[in-house]
Image (spheres, coloured by chain):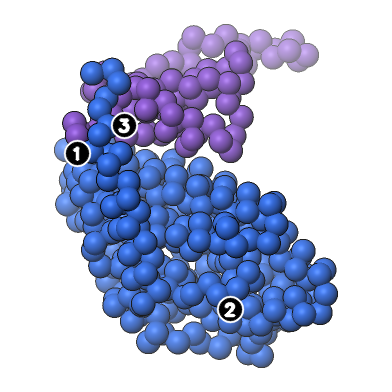
Chain colours: A blue, B purple
């Protein structure tokens, strides 16, 4: 019906809704992107729930229990969106996530070794993700755009909780303040890399832009992140850990030291020991809970 | 294990307001769908009521937007001829 006009419809600001409106190329591009997002939301919280028992206060434990529950909820909502797009079952997706290749964000491949790591991730990584996700509220695929409403709102909670926890650490004296500053330095290049390489000639990126599935260039999002977070980092009395990070008044652009793009690509393609460990924990959890799935029958049979 | 079913979830934010579609959950039966819906859609926001509806029981219109929105252009049903305070009638193009 609309096979020849799908790009016109998107350009006209229309949302696409049902499976039969979409072309094979659109479906493949959308599924690739949304499955990546789904897996990131489901693998990432393994880091977080590992930190619930180790968090330094009851309040911090509650924050991280709620945050990890939110992330799993986002993953399951996105799984529903992907299922309607691809026809795969939930069981198939769970198998792909637990046993398949590590298709998730670079940021989850790094270990969380001390309490400052979960706090910085909540503050700056969730802050960076909101930048991208807020643009995706305008996605051409209606079911994804709707799911993003809840996701963006909850990532906002996480970001504020992260900033709150960071401020508590900064107030707690010189030693903890130094740990926060070291942590910001450790995570900074990884976070800048999250937005993806500057080069926009990638085939997938162009296809996603054409279909209205990606709405901002990687570099534009990174610049927007720099504008907001260089200010925020300084406002809590910390230093931006990059001497190249200055604003050029003539180009109106931020400079920064290029992240290690070889490392970025290798994490996305080949994974890491940390990423493999997160998937291993999910597989163990599935094995432990197998009895429940096997014995569950519908109540209203 | 029997296959899961998809349940569409509708939420009422405050008593007296309409139930609005907020998403879907997958579950074995309506009772477990309701538990999942409660976790997903009431934990972080106001909620005074939830419905879960088996997707199989939803009938969707097969008409497109051009047909379904066709009532919108019928300006002649809106009386706005007299401009209050001016004593004049607006001249409207009814074509």
Who's the residue at 33% across and 81% down the image? A266
Q: Estimate the spatial distance between the alpha carbons at disc 3 and disc 1, rounded to whole Å.
A: 25 Å
Image height of A55 relative to B84, above or below: below
Q: Which residue is mark 1?
A: A20
Q: Nearer the viewer, residue A88 or A199?
A: A88
* Subunit of label 2: A
Q: Nearer the viewer, mark 2 or mark 3?
A: 3
Circles 2 and 3, Cβ within 8 Å, touching? The answer is: no
- Label of residue B27 in the image: 3
**Structural crowding at the residue carrying mark 3, measured as other residues with C-alpha within 10 Å and reported as few (<14), some (14–19) or many (≥20):** many
The local secondary structure at tag 2 comes to: helix
Numbered tag placed on residue A188 in the rendering: 2
Residue A150 x %, y %: 51, 43
Chain letter of disc 3? Answer: B
Q: CA distance from mark 1 to mark 2?
A: 43 Å
User: What is the secondary structure assignment of the residue under circle 1?
Assistant: helix
- Residue A174, given in percent of the width and then of the height, sits at 81, 79
Residue A37 appears in the picture as rendered: no
Q: Give me the residue at 27% from left, 45% from top.
A: A290
User: Residue drawn at (49%, 9%), measured in percent from left and top?
Assistant: B77
Callout 3: SS: strand
User: What is the chain letter for disc 1?
Assistant: A
The extreme bottom residue here reads A243
Quadrant of the image for the C terminus of chain A?
top left
Q: How many marks?
A: 3
């Amino acid at each position: 019906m609309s096979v020849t006009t799908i790009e016109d419809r998107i350009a006209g600001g229309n949302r696409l809704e049902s499976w039969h409106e979409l072309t094979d190329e659109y479906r493949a591009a959308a599924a690739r992107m949304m499955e990546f997002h789904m897996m990131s939301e489901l693998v990432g919280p393994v880091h977080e729930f590992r930190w619930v028992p180790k968090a330094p206060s009851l309040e911090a434990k509650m924050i991280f229990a709620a945050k990890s529950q939110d992330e799993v909820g986002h993953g399951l909502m996105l799984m529903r969106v992907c299922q309607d797009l691809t026809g795969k079952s939930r069981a198939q997706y769970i198998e792909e996530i637990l046993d398949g290749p590590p298709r998730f964000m670079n940021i989850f491949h790094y270990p969380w070794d001390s309490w400052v790591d979960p706090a910085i991730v909540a503050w700056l990584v969730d802050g960076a993700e909101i930048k991208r996700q807020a643009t995706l509220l305008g996605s051409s695929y209606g079911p994804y755009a709707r799911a993003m409403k809840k996701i963006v709102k909850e990532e906002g909670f996480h970001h504020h909780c992260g900033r709150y926890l960071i401020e508590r650490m900064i107030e707690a004296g010189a030693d903890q303040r130094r740990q926060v500053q070291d942590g910001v330095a450790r995570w900074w290049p990884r976070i800048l890399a999250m937005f993806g390489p500057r080069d926009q000639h990638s085939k997938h990126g162009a296809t996603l832009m054409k279909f209205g599935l990606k709405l901002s260039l990687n570099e534009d999002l990174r610049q927007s992140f720099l504008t907001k977070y260089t200010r925020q980092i300084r406002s809590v009395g910390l230093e931006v850990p990059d001497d190249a990070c200055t604003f050029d008044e003539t180009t109106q652009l931020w400079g920064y030291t290029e992240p290690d793009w070889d490392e970025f690509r290798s994490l996305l393609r080949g994974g890491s020991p940390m990423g493999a460990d997160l998937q291993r924990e999910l597989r163990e959890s599935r094995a432990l809970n197998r009895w429940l799935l096997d014995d569950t029958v519908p109540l209203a049979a | 294990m029997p296959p899961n079913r998809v349940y569409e979830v509708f939420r009422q934010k405050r008593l007296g307001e309409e139930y609005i579609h907020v998403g879907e959950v997958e579950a074995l039966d309506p009772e477990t769908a309701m538990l999942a819906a409660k976790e997903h859609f009431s934990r972080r926001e106001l909620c005074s009521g939830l419905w879960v509806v088996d997707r199989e029981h939803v009938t969707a219109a097969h008409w497109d937007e051009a047909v379904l929105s066709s009532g919108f252009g019928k300006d002649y049903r809106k009386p706005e001829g007299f401009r209050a305070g001016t004593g004049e009638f607006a001249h409207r193009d009814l074509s």
